[in-house]
Amino acid sequence: MTAVLPPGHPFVVTGARVHETPGTVVDRELVVADGVFLPDRPDGDVEVVAAPGAHAVPLVVDSAVAQRPPAERGVYDLVPGNVATFALVRRRVSESQIRTMLVVDPADLVAVHVRGHAEVLDGRPTRPAGEDLAEAAARDAWLGAWEDPGRDVVQHLRPDGRYSETRSGRVDAYTGRFWVRDGRITYLDDTGFWAFGELLGRTLHHAGMVMTRTGA
């Protein structure tokens, strides 16, 4: 896929190995319309995304799953009726990588979709960093310093769509750009990798880190 489809436009992913959950892999189509997975292709114009050999994986971190009530933990599964939030990766992805720290080289990242919207296509972002932060609600939800004291990490999310991390007192240990949508954050590090996180309530989950905003 090389073009951003209009919001809500139905598309179907073919040829991928679908990780319905981190431990369950099946070979089937993924049908998406209006931001959710459908059981079958709808009538009318449907964009076909050929992804032979790719892996379709849920964007999930175990710490975020644990924060949800048991009845809600299936919302991450790539099954009909759920929100279409997933990544398409050209290489094999293990269960432990999905659960804890999914890090993908741009050359290996076919696409990232959050609620059916393309965040990344062919390893590149679909819009400029900072564009998501034009609305006050997005700024209020995301911007500031996020800390995981147990890991001695502070992540700074800035109005220009840039981030930096201080790790064990080392300033700018990681720096890069970020994009937000529907409680999800997508990072592109300056050293050349994509990573992902989720905001649940006042807690930001990312790569095994559980961060709360300082001063909140």
Image (tube, rainbow, N blue to C red):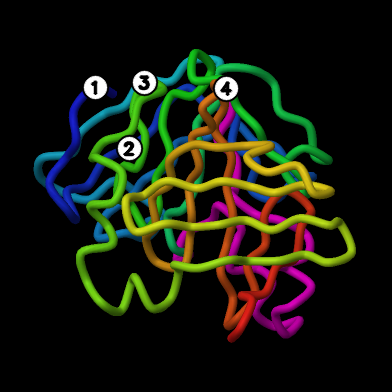
Q: Between disc 1 and disc 2, whose residue precedes?
A: 1
- Whether residue 47 sits left or right of residue 59 in the image: it is left
Residue type indicated by callout 2: Val
Furthest toward the right, the residue is 150
- Mark 4, mark 3: which one is toward the viewer? 4
Q: Give the mark, 2 or 3, whose residue is nearer the N terminus.
A: 2
Relative image position of residue 35 (x, y in whole percent): 32, 59
Separation (CA) of disc 1 from disc 2: 14 Å
Calculate the distance from the C-alpha at mark 4 to the C-alpha at mark 3.
18 Å
Residue denoted by label 1:
2
Q: Mark 4 or mark 1, which is nearer the start of the sequence? A: 1
Cα–Cα gap, marks 2 and 3? 17 Å
SS at circle 3? loop
- Quadrant location of the C terminus? bottom right
Is 56 part of what is drawn in magenta? yes
Of callouts 1 and 3, the N-terminal one: 1
Q: CA distance from mark 1 to mark 3?
A: 7 Å
Write the residue at 39% across / 33% down: 13
User: What x and y, as percent, mark residue 45?
Assistant: 10, 40
Per the image, the residue denoted by label 2 is 12
Q: Residue 85 at x, y = what percent?
A: 46, 53
Q: Nearer the viewer, mark 1 or mark 4?
A: 4
Q: Position of residue 199 (x, y in %)?
A: 56, 69
Q: Nearer the viewer, residue 29 or 114?
A: 114
Question: Could you tell whether 133 is left or right of 216 in the image?
Answer: left
Verify CB contact (< 8 Å) between mark 1 and mark 3.
yes
Q: Quadrant of residue 155?
A: bottom right
N-term-proximal mark, 2 vs 4: 2
Camera-near label (1 vs 2) is 1
Residue at the image point whose x is 79% and y is 73% from the top:
66
The residue identified by callout 4 is: 191
